[in-house]
Amino acid sequence: MSKLISILGSTGSVGVQTLDVIRNLGYKVIGLTANSNVELLEKQVREFKPRIVAVGEEVFTRDVKNRFESLGVEIYSGEEGLIKVATADEAEMVVASIVGIAGLVPVFEAIKKGKDIALANKEVLVAAGEIVMAEVRKRQVKILPVDSEHSAVFQCLHGNKNKEVNRIILTASGGPFRGKKASELENVSVEDALAHPNWKMGSKITIDSATLMNKGLEVIEARWLFDIQPEKIDILIHPQSIIHSMVEYIDGSVIAQLGIPDMRVPIQYALSYPSRRYNNYEKLDLLKYGKLTFEEPDYSTFSCLRLAYEALAIGGTMPAAMNGANEEAVNLFLNKKIRFGDIPRIIKKVMDSHTVNIMPDLNDIIKVDCWARNAARNACTCA
């Protein structure tokens, strides 16, 4: 049976792979959004023929508006446009693949409209997990994880009860700097940090993988997504990225989900759930890999991981402050305004100066995110 899908962030890595999955499944696209890649968005519109599209405010010129209206689609811009696409009446599911806090409000509005969410945007639950999941329960919608690690956990939990879970084990490749010490990473280049050994991802997520902040964000996401206490969430470095995550049960059984590093597989499972559908993607050949290895994470060298755990333990608005500071610090690094080693230092400075609100609403989260970004930019001058 076909589904009607809106995609937030269709020109990014996950968005492009989602459309590849949709080609295979034969689903109908209702809405698409892009920030600035208008050329790719136009190609997607011509192929998938959505009813509605949205672009970033900076590229919303008369020429762009005319270009898409001539294709017979409604066009909007900015956050208003994201919300229009996310809440389109026909859409049954929204794929949230926008990177960063920009996805929070559109996803929240989609949930309020009763849409199921295929979630690739970690920051939605990192910044506002308790608020978002309360709304999910209220509206009785589904959040289906797209990240390979959370999809793996979701599959390993299937048919079992949370009270039977001893711990969740999130695996991590270790990124491009696995085995390095902090002194070796101080001045690594942007190009080296973007050279992930296993996965093809957008630049922000790839840098987060290099600092291991990505895994810290996943811990916070898992806490809310699976309603499990932080002390039951562990991380294990697994360089081959074949075991995507595991669940250990109270009887000692460990259930793992395996596959080659291909984001299309968890994307497809989220879109087709509860069914599994055929595809012609490469299948896992364990003989090809020979052996699978595991290591403890180095919390000293990769201090972003420790900061994420600290933010989760403090709670309230601290995860939002940490996330906003990280987004800004990564942006500064990508623009070569700070060193790689400055990223965790800036995040720590912002966290140390943040006054936590233990019972925030969504507006409080958004204000803290804005504050944290400004604080990170200010910290940049003395990092």
Image: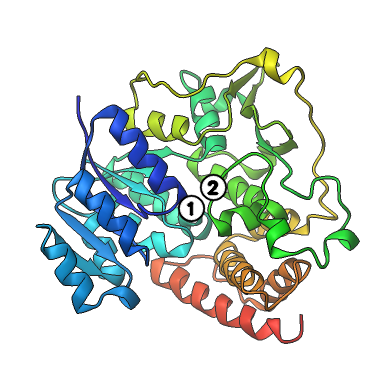
Separation of disc 2 and disc 1 at Cα? 5 Å
Mark 1 sits on what residue?
A: 125
Name the residue at 57% across, 67% down: 327
Q: Amino acid at mark 2?
A: Glu
- Left or right: 133 with respect to 64? right
- Left or right: 372 with respect to 178? left
Mark 2 sits on what residue?
A: 221
- Left or right: 62 with respect to 190? left
Q: Position of residue 342 (x, y in %)?
A: 76, 71
Q: Nearer the viewer, residue 55 or 356?
A: 55
Q: Nearer the viewer, residue 24 or 52?
A: 24
Name the residue at 67% across, 47% down: 196
Which quadrant of the structure image shows residue 211? Answer: bottom right
> Is label 2 in contact with label 1 (beta carbons under 8 Å)?
yes
Task: Rate crowding at label 2 as few (under 14), some (14 to 19) or many (20 or more) other CA atoms within 10 Å.
Answer: many
Name the residue at 12% across, 64% down: 69
Helix or strand or loop: what does disc 1 sit on? helix
Q: Amino acid at mark 1?
A: Leu
Looking at the figure, which quarter contains the C terminus? Answer: bottom right
Task: Rate crowding at label 1 as few (under 14), some (14 to 19) or many (20 or more) other CA atoms within 10 Å.
Answer: many
Which quadrant of the structure image shows residue 83? Answer: bottom left
Q: Position of residue 137 (x, y in %)?
A: 34, 43
